[in-house]
Amino acid sequence: MTRGTALHANISPSRYNWIGTSAGISGLGFNYTVRQHDAGVELYIDRGKEASAENERIFDQLLAARESIEEVFGEPLDWQRLEGKRALRIKKQIDLGGYRDEATWPAAYEAMIDAMTRLEKALKPHIRKLRT
């Protein structure tokens, strides 16, 4: 079993398809997402109403360190500006199944924990340096 991260240890699921916790700065969250046939982990950036420019600035600061972040993560990430929305995200999609694929839940679960552990490790040093 994957050792993982304690980020989400005390968080219970809700009616949404995601579960998240703070990345240490208001408006930045480490989230697990689960859809019908896939899952993922992400850093979601949304500092609130009227904060689109600030969200972009944070995203761009992280994007400037993309090579270093992806090197620590161990593979490419999906850097999404989410056109038409104020939020942005840095995501790793996991195509091992979703909530409708019960037979693959154990493999998807392990892959999600592994990806979240690596995402936190790759992003935390850069998040600490953000100018917010």
Image (spheres, rainbow, N blue to C red):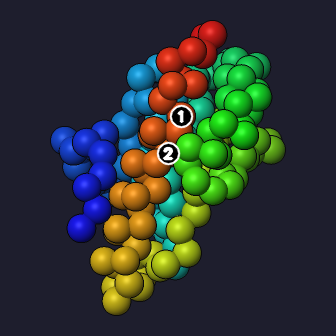
Residue at 58 percent of width and 63 percent of height: 93
Q: Which residue is drawn at 34% across and 68% down?
A: 109
Asked which secondary structure carries label 1, the reply is helix
Image marks 1 and 2: residues in contact by CB distance under 8 Å: yes
Q: Position of 75 compared to 84: left or right?
A: left
Give the image quarter of residue 67: top right
- Three-letter residue code for mark 1: Leu
Crowding at dot 1, Cα within 10 Å, few <14 / some 14-19 / many 20+, comes out as many
Measured in 3D between alpha carbons, the distance from the residue under mark 1 to the one under mark 2, in whole angstroms, is 6 Å
Q: Residue at point 41% right, 23% down?
A: 24
* Residue 77: image location, x then y, percent: 66, 52
- In this view of the protein, can residue 27 be seen by the observer? no
Give residue 130's quadrant in the image: top right
Question: Any mark on residue 112, and which?
Answer: none
Residue at figure coordinates x 55%, y 75% from the top left: 95
Residue 124, compared with residue 79, is above or below; it is above
Q: Which of 24 and 122 is in front in this view?
A: 122
Residue designated by label 2: 119
The residue lying furthest to the left in this view is 10
Mark 2 is surrounded, within 10 Å at the Cα level, by few (under 14), some (14 to 19) or many (20 or more) other residues, namely many
What is the three-letter code of the residue carrying label 2?
Leu
Residue 30 image point, x, y percent: 45, 40
Quarter of the rendering containing residue 102: bottom left
Q: Which residue in the rendered view is the most extreme toward the top?
A: 131
